Image (cartoon, grey):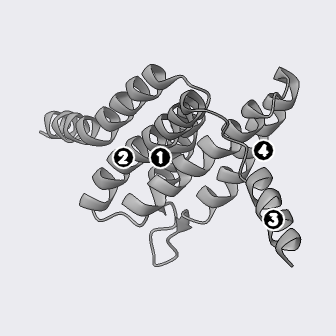
């Protein structure tokens, strides 16, 4: 019976051996935490504005996108395989984003809601991909730009619209 438990223990060790050293553990941790944090920043802004997709949704999208590219990269996938993974992430997020878009049928025929939320989720996935690939500076810069678009552009648009009225 003792040999059986030893075999189970050795098998469990082999199953959890994908992170082999402290350097790799640090790299994985930083990339995943960076993705979740940056997604959370964008999600906080959206939640603060009362939008449907908030902190948790944005964090999960960024974290998931990072994980989707990090695992194949750690497994030694070639550039063509990574390209297909990224294409799959982009397409999958497109379906998620489509679920946030609603057409108002209550009189205003041309009014569509959720496009910015869908685009924000798409952007959040791209930020997660950047973080997962180890492009943390690019991910941070993209988050700052997206945050500016979410926060500053509505103010600019309102100011311009006020200037147009007689």
- Left/right of residue 33 with respect to residue 129 in the rendered view: left
- Marks 2 and 1 close (CB-CB < 8 Å): yes
Mark toward the start of the polypeptide (3 vs 4): 3
Tell me the mark number nearer the camera, choosing from 3 and 1: 3
- Left/right of residue 17 with respect to residue 130 in the rendered view: right
Q: Using the image as rendered, state which of residue 117 and residue 16 is in the foreground.
A: 16
Q: Using the image as rendered, state which of residue 149 and residue 21 is in the foreground.
A: 21
**Quadrant (top left, top right, bottom left, bottom right) of the C terminus:** top left
| Residue matched to label 1 | 120
Q: Residues within 10 Å of mark 1 (few under 14, many from 20)?
A: many
Tell me the mark number nearer the camera, choosing from 2 and 1: 2
- Marks 4 and 2 close (CB-CB < 8 Å): no
Q: Residues within 10 Å of mark 4 (few under 14, many from 20)?
A: some
* Label 4 – label 2 distance at C-alpha: 22 Å
- Marks 3 and 1 close (CB-CB < 8 Å): no
| Residue matched to label 3 | 6
Mark toward the start of the polypeptide (4 vs 2): 2
| Residue matched to label 2 | 42
- Left/right of residue 10 with respect to residue 101 in the rendered view: right
| Residue matched to label 4 | 88
What element does badge 2 sit on?
A: helix
Query: Which residue is drawn at the image coordinates 39% and 23% (left, top)?
Result: 141
């Amino acid at each position: 019976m003792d040999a059986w438990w030893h075999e189970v223990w050795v098998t469990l060790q082999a199953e959890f051996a994908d992170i082999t050293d402290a350097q790799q553990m640090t790299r994985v941790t930083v990339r995943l935490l960076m993705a979740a944090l940056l997604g959370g920043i964008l999600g906080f802004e959206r939640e603060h504005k009362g939008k449907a997709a908030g902190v948790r949704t944005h964090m999960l999208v960024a974290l998931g996108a990072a994980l989707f590219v990090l695992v194949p990269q750690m497994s030694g996938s070639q550039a063509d395989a990574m390209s297909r993974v990224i294409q799959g992430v982009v397409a999958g997020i497109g379906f998620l984003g489509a679920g946030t878009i609603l057409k108002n049928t209550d009189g205003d025929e041309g009014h569509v809601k959720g496009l910015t939320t869908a685009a924000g989720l798409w952007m959040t996935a791209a930020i997660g991909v950047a973080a997962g690939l180890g492009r943390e500076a690019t991910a941070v810069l993209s988050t700052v730009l997206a945050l500016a678009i979410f926060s500053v552009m509505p103010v600019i648009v309102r100011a311009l619209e006020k200037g147009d009225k007689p």
